[in-house]
Structure formats: C-alpha cells, structure tokens
Image: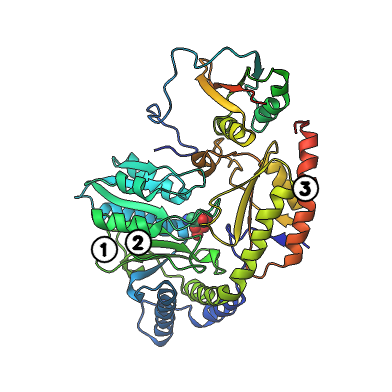
C-alpha cells in the first residue's frame, strides 16, 4: 500500500521498471529543476518548451514527488505528448515531453 | 467580513446544536452508568440522542455508538472489523482515495502482519466497482469505501460495492463523514463511520454504526461503557448536540441544499471561464453538491490559500503539504491530476450568493498576481 508520508522498506511494486534503453529520441533541451518544488518545475517547462522546435523533445529533471504526477497531468491538460520518464541515478526523474504545437 | 467556504473541514455549529449542548451541559452532566435520578436523566438523554441519530441514518438505536471523532469511529471499525474476522484472513481492501484515518488504520493493520490492497480510481477520483470487486479475496476480512471523497467531492459507487461485498461475504465499512446529514447512504454496508462536526454538531463527536449480526471485536482494552464499543465516560452533551444538529441539518438540506448546489454550479462554470489554465477536478456529475475543487496551473496552493485568506475567504486545499510529509495529496496523485494550485470550496449552510460573487470577482486577479510574481508568461 502506498500513502503519503509513509516510509517503505520494500521497493514499490506499482512503480514502472526503469527502461534499460531510452524510451524515445534524445532531448534537444534539458531543463534542470532538481531541488525545485512544484509548481516551479512545471513553470520552467511551460516557459521553455517554446525553445524547442515542434515535434522535438524537451526533458525536465525534477525530484519533487509532486512532479511525478504534475508533469504528465500538465501534458494532458496542454495537449503536449508525455513520451517517457527515466529514473535518475542521483534521485529524481527525467521527464521527456514532445512539443506538439 | 470573511466568508467561510470550508464546510468539508468543519461546518459551523448549528444553533440547534448550541442550544441543546448548553441545556445538556446543565441537565445531562451526571454519570449515565449510575442509578440515581440525575444519572437516569443523563442516560435517557444519551439513549434519545442515539435514537435520533439512528432515525436519520435509518438504522437501529442499539447499532449506534458515539465516539470521540470520526477518526476514532474509522479506527474502531477498521481494526475491530478486521479483528473479528481474523479466522477468515488478514486481508483488507481500501480505495486509494480514502481519508487518512482509514489509510493509517490500514497501515497499522499491515504493520501487525496484515495485508492491504488499495484499489485505484479514475481521473475523476471514482472507484470502479468491478475493480473493487476483483480485489476481494477469500481471505479478505474487511473492505472500506468512503461515501464521498473529502478533497474532490466525488461520490463513490457504494451500492455496487456493497453488493459485491455481500456476494463475497466480506463486511463493508462506509466512511460517510463527508455525506452523512446531507444525503442517505445506500444500504448494504456492515459498518459506518461519521463525524458530527461535519454536519454542524460539536467537535469531538463521531458516530460508529455496527449493523446487527455483524461481528466486531474491540481492538482496545475492555471497558463497560459506550455499549462496549467505545471506552470511557460518555460525552452525553456532545451526543445530544450531535443528534440535534443532524436532525436540523437533514431537515434544512431540503431547502438549502439546492440553493448551495446552484452556487457551486456557478463556481464550476465561472472559474474556468474567468481564470486561464484552471482544471475543475472530481466527478462532474456524481459529486457532493456543496463542494467544488479546482487547480490553478503555475500557482503554489499554499500561496493561493494565503492570498484568498487575505482577501477574506476561508478555503482549503488538498495539496497543502503537512509538516510531516513532503508528498502531494494522495487523492490528487491517485487521480493523476495536477497536485499544485489546488483550491477546495465547500459551502456551509446559509452561504450567501453575494459572497460567492465576490469570490468570483477577486479570484482571477489573485491567481494572475501570483503567476506574475512567479515569472509566468506562458499562455
Ligand atoms: C472522509 C473523512 N473521513 C473521516 C474524517 C475524520 O473525522 P474527524 O474530523 O471527526 O476525526 C474526515 C474529516 O476530516 C473525513 O473527511
């Protein structure tokens, strides 16, 4: 069972396994939002996605657990494509998003 | 003048509850377990309060016990319901969006060697009855489902889940804290938990209902009081006031409910029109009529609540991180919706239309100001 504030001993069974291969083409822009609390990673993504050409990939690095929900949710709201997510060795995630318009 | 829009946290004390509370503090203070006149009076008041609550909830008076909170009612139901079925097994089924009182009790059960399955929800926060049914196993001791969600107001499919539990022979606990006194709970459950301060009763009074014939074993040390369900000297004045508030709230809901529902509908349609990049969350149809939750992109929920407080509005949020956790709301997370910039508006009885209009007037600027100060230029 998974619940806020809970410290678990076992790894979360529901978590997606880390793909050994990148799940998509390399990003043309990497936004470093590590250490920043939501909504700042989402603001950085919204502001800077315009810097990549339509059809290209932008990656956001973030370690606020809220980003794990907020990045895919933002993509759905904004009709951008959430391509894949990687788990970073140093903690946190890299979220890969394709600019759709 | 400040407008109070946080009924889901607590409803202001109903005048009927206040009057009966004061009367009972004077007239029903004696020990209801004793045999003299004043004690008999207190006992009669307690029995009457139980009968009144039972009447509104549609159950038998001897099935009702008063607890010290909704949280305690949930804890007793989860742990006592599981303990009584230890021979069947030690597996619990809960929805992923239950109140922390349910999830913390389930964690305790898990730490004691039990097993817990959390059933997920859709993007509106609603449990799929088929998925819930599929989680029931031969060794499932108890299933728990809220009547309605406390953060987003989504009404859960209690009737369908109760039917699945009946078919599987698993008792069901319904946490009705957010809907009791507002709407009837569908039948078919074994345990029900509710909280008086949510319907205009006093703080520190909860209700635990255990249906006749349902097995329950106290997880606490033995005590003769509270019908052997809730230990300790009974809060008779609190129970009396809780019963008074429940009857009054239920009676007035017929008139005030539709009025509040119309105000909430207005917020639901106007907020996305007036504020860019807003998402109204929760089930659009199957929901509590007095509550609406929305998320404003690019705004920190805490900052928005503070700004609205400054402007004279008491509202709450599912996303505010509590001191002991950095995790976002488990409800919004389970729904997969934006967890930041979250505002829950829940209207108490008698909310004035003018206050709602003023809220709609100040909200767009408040959000725009916070976005500007965060450096947001994105359309
Ligand atoms: C769904 C739900 N269950 C249980 C509770 C706990 O009730 P109380 O505040 O009386 O402990 C609440 C109140 O926050 C609630 O909203």
Image coords of residue B126 (percent x, y): 46, 49
SS at mark 1 in the image:
loop
In this rendering, position of residue A18 left or right of residue A33: left
Q: State the quadrant of the C terminus of chain B.
A: top right
Same subunit, labels 1 and 2: the answer reads yes
Chain at numbered mark 1: B
In this rendering, position of residue B176 left or right of residue B294: left
Using the image, determine if residue B173 lies above or below residue A84: below
Using the image, determine if residue B69 lies above or below residue B99: below
Instruction: Give the spatial CA distance, label 1 vs label 2.
Output: 8 Å
Instruction: Give the spatial CA distance, label 1 vs label 3.
Output: 52 Å
Using the image, determine if residue A38 lies above or below residue B5: above
Query: Where is mark 3, residue-wise?
Result: B364
Question: Residue at 33% across / 42% down in the picture?
Answer: B116
In this orientation, which residue lies closer to the viewer: A21 or B216? A21
Which of disc 2 and disc 3 is earlier in sequence? 2
State the colouring used for the structure image: rainbow
Q: Is label 3's Cβ within 8 Å of ligand 1?
A: no
In this orientation, which residue lies closer to the viewer: B228 or B165? B165
Question: Residue at 50% across / 13% down in the picture?
Answer: A22
Mark 3 burial class by Cα count in 10 Å: few <14, some 14-19, many 20+: some
Question: CB atoms at circles 1 and 2 under 8 Å apart?
Answer: yes
In this rendering, position of residue B61 left or right of residue B18: left
Q: Is label 2's Cβ within 8 Å of ligand 1?
A: no
Query: Where is mark 2, residue-wise?
Result: B191
Same subunit, labels 3 and 2: the answer reads yes
Chain at numbered mark 2: B
SS at mark 2 in the image:
strand
Query: Where is mark 1, residue-wise?
Result: B214
Image coords of residue B113 (percent x, y): 28, 40
Tag of residue B274: none
Q: Nearer the viewer, mark 3 or mark 2?
A: 3
């Amino acid at each position: 069972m998974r619940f806020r504030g809970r410290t678990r001993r076992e790894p979360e069974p529901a978590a997606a396994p880390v793909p050994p291969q990148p799940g998509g083409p390399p990003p043309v822009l990497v936004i470093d939002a590590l250490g920043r609390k939501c909504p700042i990673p989402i603001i950085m993504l919204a502001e800077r996605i315009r810097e990549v050409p339509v059809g290209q990939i932008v990656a956001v690095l973030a370690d606020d657990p809220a980003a794990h929900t907020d990045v895919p949710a933002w993509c759905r709201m904004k009709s951008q494509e959430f391509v894949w997510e990687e788990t970073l060795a140093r903690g946190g995630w890299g979220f890969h998003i394709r600019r759709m318009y | 003048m400040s407008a109070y829009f946080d009924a889901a946290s607590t409803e202001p004390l109903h005048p009927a509850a206040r009057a009966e509370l004061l009367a009972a503090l004077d007239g029903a203070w004696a020990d209801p377990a004793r045999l003299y006149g004043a004690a008999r009076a207190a006992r009669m008041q307690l029995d009457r309060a139980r009968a009144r609550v039972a009447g509104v909830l549609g159950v038998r008076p001897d099935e009702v016990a008063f607890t010290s909170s909704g949280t305690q009612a949930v804890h007793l139901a989860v742990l006592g319901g599981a303990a009584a079925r230890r021979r069947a097994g030690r597996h619990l089924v809960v929805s992923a969006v239950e109140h922390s009182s349910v999830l913390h009790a389930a964690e305790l059960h898990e730490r004691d060697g039990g097993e817990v399955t959390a059933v997920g929800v859709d993007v509106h926060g609603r449990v799929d009855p088929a998925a819930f049914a599929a989680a029931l196993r031969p060794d499932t001791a108890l299933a728990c489902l809220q009547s309605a969600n406390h953060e987003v107001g989504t009404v859960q499919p209690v009737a369908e889940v109760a039917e699945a539990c009946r078919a599987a022979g698993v008792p069901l606990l319904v946490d009705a804290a957010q809907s009791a006194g507002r709407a009837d709970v569908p039948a078919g459950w074994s345990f029900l938990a509710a909280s008086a301060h949510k319907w205009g009763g006093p703080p520190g009074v909860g209700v635990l209902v255990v249906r006749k014939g349902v097995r329950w074993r106290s997880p606490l040390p033995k005590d003769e009081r509270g019908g052997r369900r809730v230990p300790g000297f009974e809060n008779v004045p609190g129970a009396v006031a809780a019963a008074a508030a429940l009857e009054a709230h239920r009676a007035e809901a017929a008139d005030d409910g539709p009025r509040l529902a119309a105000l909430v509908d207005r917020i639901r349609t106007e907020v996305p029109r007036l504020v860019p990049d807003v998402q109204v969350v929760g089930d659009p149809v199957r929901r509590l009529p007095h509550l609406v939750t929305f998320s404003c992109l690019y705004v920190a929920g805490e900052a928005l609540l503070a700004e609205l407080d400054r402007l004279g509005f008491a509202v709450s949020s599912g996303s505010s991180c509590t001191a002991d956790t950095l995790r976002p709301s488990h409800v919004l997370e389970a729904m997969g919706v934006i967890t930041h910039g979250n505002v829950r508006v829940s209207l108490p009885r008698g909310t004035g239309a003018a206050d709602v209009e003023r809220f709609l007037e100040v909200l767009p600027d408040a959000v725009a100001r916070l976005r500007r100060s965060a450096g947001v230029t994105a359309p």
